[in-house]
Amino acid sequence: MGEEAYYIDKISDFIESSVLAEEERGFNQMILYGRDISIEDIVSNAKRYPMMAEYQVVIVKEAQDLSRTIEKLSKYAENPQPTTILVINYKYKKIDKRKALYKTLKKTGLIYESKKLYENQVADWIRRVLSPKKYGITPKAAQMLVEFLGTNLSKINNELEKLQIILPQGTQISPEHIEEHIGISKDYNNFELRKAIGERNSVKAYKIVNYFSENPKDNPMVVTVSLLFNFFSQLLHFHGLKDKSPRNVASALKINPYFVNEYIAAARNYPMRKVSGVVSTLREFDVKSKGVGSNAVPQGDLLKELLVRILN
């Protein structure tokens, strides 16, 4: 169970492909879907005996569709069929830990909670996924994937698998690979905008904002504002650090050491008082980007106004 579906699918797929021999699956493996069944159907299937095999496997996918009745499963969980491996995939949410089902499963079964990764953890996760497959990735390329795809590990993994089909083993995946094969611009993205603003490179920043204005569907303002807000909040934290050594900055801000110099440069360009003002401005524009108090001003124009307010 849990918000991050990637590991739920991984574990379920492993059980589906590994527990039973191929010749045993026809009679002893059943895949059910929450939207099509009831708790009674699950229990009925779970109570069957395996045929010419040690176990039968019953996998319930999309079990969150049974959220209103899932507690009924607690009676079966008290005395589960010992020859049945029952797998419940409860995605994007959790069963209530205060109720009987959770407490019973803790005693008679196994519960895995798949928690969503924080944004600053995803780039490291990408490197860990690629390393056993003999691929590398540059910090900038990993950050581009995170900024474009967010923290959805399944989406990121799908894009990584595409790259592994196209690129030979041993490749260090670069921003150019990301741009060519996934379609994320290496020059016009939130990562480059953040860097340009941090360096007070107004020419580059305005070029990127103009590109965003012309391609609003691929570059929603709400995402840009959120990322800039996180950046300047971290910059505020940076100013408050006594130990500004690269190692401590990376640890305190929970960022890749590769990006530490970017924060050091930005801190020189934005004193603490200015950073506080920018954070306040970003809060204001976050509300406007969601249509509150902006009088239907196009998001491209709002973004340009925001940039003027930050840089001046």
Image: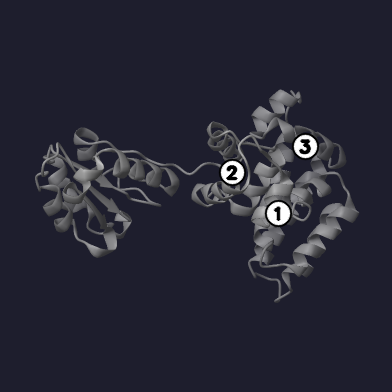
Residue type indicated by callout 1? Glu
Which of disc 2 and disc 3 is earlier in sequence?
2
Q: Is residue 2 above or below residue 208?
A: above
Q: Quadrant of the C terminus?
A: bottom right
Q: Residue shown at 77%/37% (left/top)?
A: 263
Q: Residue shown at 82%/40% (left/top)?
A: 266
* Residue 110 spot, x, y in % from top left: 27, 36
SS under mark 1: helix
Q: Which residue is mark 1?
A: 180
Q: Which residue is mark 2?
A: 119
Q: Residue shown at 38%/51% (left/top)?
A: 93
Q: Is residue 58 visible?
A: yes
Instruction: Answer few, some or many: residues within 10 Å of disc 2's Cα (few below 14, many 20 plus, some between 14 and 19).
Output: some
Instruction: Answer few, some or many: residues within 10 Å of disc 3's Cα (few below 14, many 20 plus, some between 14 and 19).
Output: many
Which of disc 2 and disc 1 is earlier in sequence?
2
Q: Which residue is mark 3?
A: 263
Rounded to the nearest whole Å, what is the CA distance between mark 3 and mark 2? 17 Å
